[in-house]
Amino acid sequence: MNLLLKLSSELSKYMNDLKDYSVSVEEIHHTKKLDAPSGTAITIADGISENHEAYSGWCLEPDVIPGKIPVRAVREGMVPGTHTITWESDIDTLVLKHEARNRKGLAFGAVLAAEFIAKRKGVFTMSDVLGF
């Protein structure tokens, strides 16, 4: 997931020059998830809007506000988490997608982060842990 966050943020810088494209974010989670949109979807949208001059924040669909990134939140079945960023124009579509198959990746990331900070002092993010 952290790689998708980085890629979507970086891609949005390049998309500044391609004015015919618009972006949207979709997140799908299990029916017991209470927040909508997810914090991850908000982080994705914030990363895009920080790096793309046409956007200043996000809005939750079905509301569509000019200059805001539309975020669609879907709750279905037992989906651990799927996040899709779509850049669309009249000519083509570019999609970045992360689909969690289970929660093992979250546990692995927590252990990796704990090992990283074990002998360090300060405040760190997963970008620090992963080296980007």
Image (tube, rainbow, N blue to C red):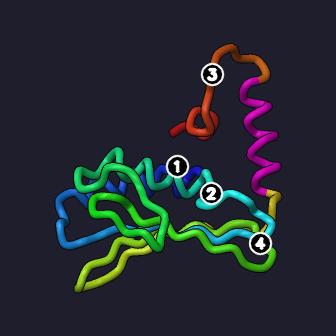
Residue placed furthest toward the front: 63
- Image point 22% across, 57% down: which residue? 16
Magenta segment:
105-117
**In the rendered structure, which disc, 2 or 1, sits on the residue that comes first in sequence?**
2
Residue placed furthest toward the bottom: 91
Q: CA distance from mark 1 to mark 3?
A: 18 Å
Task: State if disc 1 and disc 4 touch (CB < 8 Å).
Answer: no
State the mark number for residue 38. 2
Say whether residue 1 is left or right of residue 68.
Answer: right
Task: State if disc 4 and disc 2 touch (CB < 8 Å).
Answer: no
Work out whether residue 68 or residue 23 is closer to the camera in this orientation and state it: 68
Mark 2 residue element:
loop
Q: Is residue 53 above or below residue 113?
A: below
Work out whether residue 87 or residue 56 is closer to the camera in this orientation and state it: 56
Mark 1 residue element:
helix
Identify the residue under disc 4: 31
Q: Amino acid at mark 1?
A: Thr
Q: Amino acid at mark 2?
A: Ser
Task: State if disc 3 and disc 2 touch (CB < 8 Å).
Answer: no
- Image point 81% across, 60% down: which residue? 103
Q: Amino acid at mark 3?
A: Val
Mark 4 residue element:
loop
Identify the residue under disc 1: 43
Q: Residue 89, how many percent across, how many down?
A: 26, 79
Q: CA distance from mark 2 to mark 4?
A: 12 Å
- Image point 74% across, 46% down: which residue? 109
Q: Quadrant of the N terminus?
A: bottom right
State the mark number for residue 123. 3
Say whether residue 21 is left or right of residue 37.
Answer: left
